[in-house]
Amino acid sequence: MELITLFGTPGPPDPTIGDKVRNAVSRTRDDLAARLRDVVAGRPEIDSDLLGDLEAVMIGADMGVRTTREILDAIRERVARDGLKDPDGLRQALRAELGRALDVEAPPLAGTEPGSPFVIFVVGVNGVGKTTTIGKLAHRFRRNGHTVMLGAADTFRAAAIEQLEIWADRTGVPVVKQRPGADPSAVVFDTVRSAAARGVDYVIVDTAGRLHTKHNLMAELEKMTRIAGREVDGAPHEVLLVLDATTGQNGLIQAREFARAAGLTGVVLTKLDGTAKGGIVTAVVRELGIPVRFVGTGETIEDLVEFSAEAFVDSLFAA
Ligand code: GDP
Ligand code: MG
């Protein structure tokens, strides 16, 4: 099972992506795909028993109750309307419906105005992998020949700023920071203004793992957004929610809260190497209506893979 088949083209050939990543990613596929196959195998017809088993597999793989129901409703309709009978037809129908569920528009992560930075905010609760993902993203943009500047707007803890600096060193990109406890919006202002003045291609802003229930913290995120937009047209151009795949449905609840407050445009699903429950991808896309942009598959700088819905669905149904 090639990584490239599961998650689409990971950019230019990358000799340092090792077997570890390959194995980690294929675990999701193997598990989910095998279960889907097992459910259908040897069943002579599509009956409510079979659909019930299918429902259990989908929910067990973290596809989410709502998403699973929607997909199964669509399949029941196909059974009734198209006279779908045999389990192989069911596989095809499931594939089509999953494909539809994952089909959301994902504009390129790139600016349209030369010389004006493309600004990315990275949000999410503590420990999901925001700072790590920023390091990986910076590396990816650099490798593709772009310039990058980081903003340390997680000013809540000194350690958070230091951690971002470590990643900045590793990737060879500048980081704009202030002292711990500083106003995050002031950091955003400094970073975006400095990046614009120097014609930097990408700005990536690290944010605090704010408690989304606290109104003042959400207000802060809004302020950061306002400040960025005043300096660069349309900024932030991307607001990426980082979700830890191992937290399953909890992650989905976080996602809903952030979506309400932060105008999310995409998701990065981390720690997919630590779970076989890759079905969370479907739940996130379906329920939030935003694309999964990248998948984290480990702790090193190379462990970030571009997500492709089409390749993901294909891989689930590969023979
Ligand atoms: P933050 O609090 O959201 O900034 O999270 P960090 O970036 O500090 O990451 C928290 C922990 O998750 C660290 O130990 C990271 O090494 C780890 N981590 C981040 N992404 C991944 C991933 O894709 N896979 C694995 N296995 N660990 C990850
Ligand atoms: Mg952090």
Image (cartoon, rainbow, N blue to C red):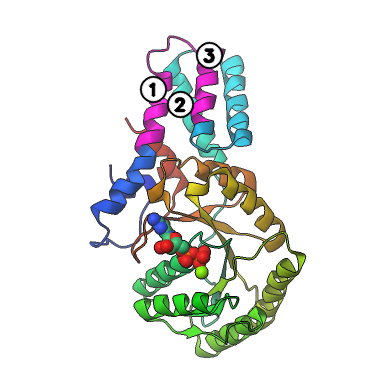
Q: Secondary structure at mark 3?
A: helix
**Residue 299 quadrant:** bottom left
**Could you tell me residue 217's position as x and y percent?**
71, 69
Residue placed most toward the observer, 227 or 110: 227
In percent of width and height, residue 6 lies at 37, 45
Is 56 contained in the magenta span? yes
> Of the residues under marks 2 and 3, which one precedes in the sequence?
3
Point 55% across, 19% down: residue: 52
- The disc label shown at residue 49, or none: 3
Q: Amino acid at mark 1?
A: Asp
Q: Type of residue at label 3?
A: Asp
The earlier-in-sequence mark between 1 and 2 is 1
The residue range painted magenta reads: 30-58
122 in the magenta segment: no
Q: Residue 122, image x and y in percent?
A: 56, 67
Q: Secondary structure at mark 2?
A: helix
User: Relative to residue 166, is residue 72 drawn left or right?
Assistant: right
Please, what is the dominant secondary structure of the magenta stretch? helix
Q: Which mark is residue 92?
A: 2
Give whichever of 245, 88 is nearer the camera.
Answer: 245
Quarter occupied by the C terminus: top left
Q: Residue at x 34, y 41 (%)?
A: 27
Question: Which residue is tagged 1?
Answer: 38
Q: Residue furthest top?
A: 44
Crowd around label 3: few <14 · some 14–19 · many ≥20 (10 Å)? few
Residue 215 quadrant: bottom right
Residue in view at x 36 percent, y 71 percent: 144
